[in-house]
Image (spheres, rainbow, N blue to C red):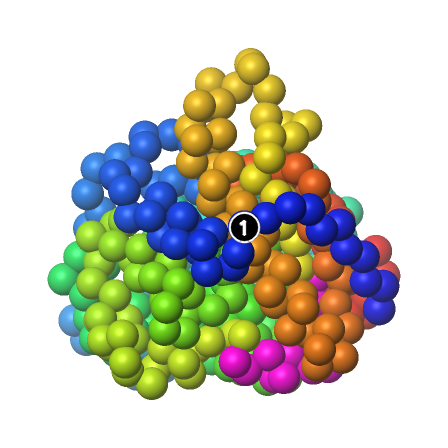
Amino acid sequence: MRVWRVVGEVASVAGVLMLVAGAAAADPPTSGPDLGPPGGYHAPAEGAGVAALPVITGIEPITDRWLRVFVRSPAMNRIVQVQVLLPADRGRPRSTLYLLDGRGAPERESSWTEHGHAVEFFADKNVNVVLATGGPANLYTDWQRRDPVLGTNKWETFLTRELPPLIDARFDGNGRNAIEGVSMGGEAAMMLTVRNPGLYRAVAAHSGCYTVASGAGQAQARAIVETYGGNPDNMFGPPTDPDWLAHDVMSHAEALRGTAIYLSSGSGIPGEHDTPDQTDLTDTLTVGGPLEAGAYACAVALADRLARLQIPAAVNLRHTGTHSWPYWADELTRSWPTIAYALSTDN
């Protein structure tokens, strides 16, 4: 697999990660990159008597090829909405790509469709695309305990065990899967791939961090949860709990061997999409710049780890670019050849 690197000047990994943690822990601005609502977040209501087996309870068309799909999840103890993009040719089985959102994941929509141009990009692709909705600030993981603010989070079980068989059965999936995410979702995409060997043929991660081990890596993960009022101890326990290390991609990178990998980040320096006519330019530069600089350091660290292990990866480290959706929309296009080849799709 092709590997390319564009490495610029960045601070130390630990130093920049602490900058990321500090920026995320501060009061979030009301606009800008990868942000949720300015007010408090309340988890969706959980239902009593959820069925013992996951089941699709309803489908609501947005268009003839863009659907809201409602899944009763025993793990999450509620009905979870995902969205599905279908190919034009639905007469034969096809692979499935799962797209994960960032920290401010909207409850009923996906930033991939609103800002990432996913609907337009996949219009001519022979693949099912499943977009997670909701789940802000929880890293798409299985939490140890229910959180009073963020509710019950069993996203790993939902995304890796409950949902794929339902998608394949209802939408002619062929069992080949890939996963892709941005920011928090990029971190989660790598984490889910490491923890579920063989489930995904390809993983693409943009502007994420890939360690939750003690120190700066755990600090950034805790800061993500705390921005929405959640308690990170409810996720993986106190700082010394071994569950943190069990979810650490850097420590378990060997599990990525055999998976097609695409890894990207900008440097945090303003680039082609950071222009004076942006309504949120101040937030993009003051928040999105430092966040992306931290993500750059994380990407460098993971790329070096993969290189030492001699695990092939396509790595795109850009000289410029902030932590914002225009750059991630570009990376959707750039990462597709890596994903499509691994899924053996014909377009």
Q: Which quarter of the figure has residue 319?
A: top right
**Which residue in the rendered view is the most extreme toward the left?**
148
Q: Which residues are magenta?
A: 251-262
Split into 4 quadrants, where in the image is the C terminus? bottom right
Q: Which quarter of the figure has residue 196?
A: bottom right
Give the left or right position of residue 53, taking residue 151 as reference.
right
Total number of numbered discs in the rendering: 1
Who's the residue at 43% across and 31% down the image? 286
Residue 59 in the image: state x and y as whole percent.
Answer: 45, 56
Viewer-side residue, 166 vs 237: 237
Viewer-side residue, 286 vs 112: 286
Question: Dot 1: within a 10 Å radius of its alpha carbon, few (fewer than 14), some, or many (20 or more) residues?
Answer: few
Residue 90 shows in this picture? no
Residue 253 located within the stretch drawn in magenta:
yes
Residue 215 in the image: state x and y as whole percent.
Answer: 37, 68
Residue 35 in the image: state x and y as whole percent.
Answer: 38, 40
Who's the residue at 52% across and 80% down the image? 251
* Residue designated by label 1: 11
Give the left or right position of residue 335, taking residue 116 as reference.
right
Q: Amino acid at mark 1?
A: Ala
Split into 4 quadrants, where in the image is the N terminus? bottom right
Q: Compared to 12, does 256 lie above or below? A: below
Viewer-side residue, 319 vs 275: 319
Residue 201 located within the stretch drawn in magenta:
no
Give the left or right position of residue 289, taking residue 77 as reference.
right
Q: Compared to 71, does 236 lie above or below? A: below
Give the left or right position of residue 14, taking residue 310 as reference.
left
Residue 226 shows in this picture? yes
Viewer-side residue, 290 vs 9: 9
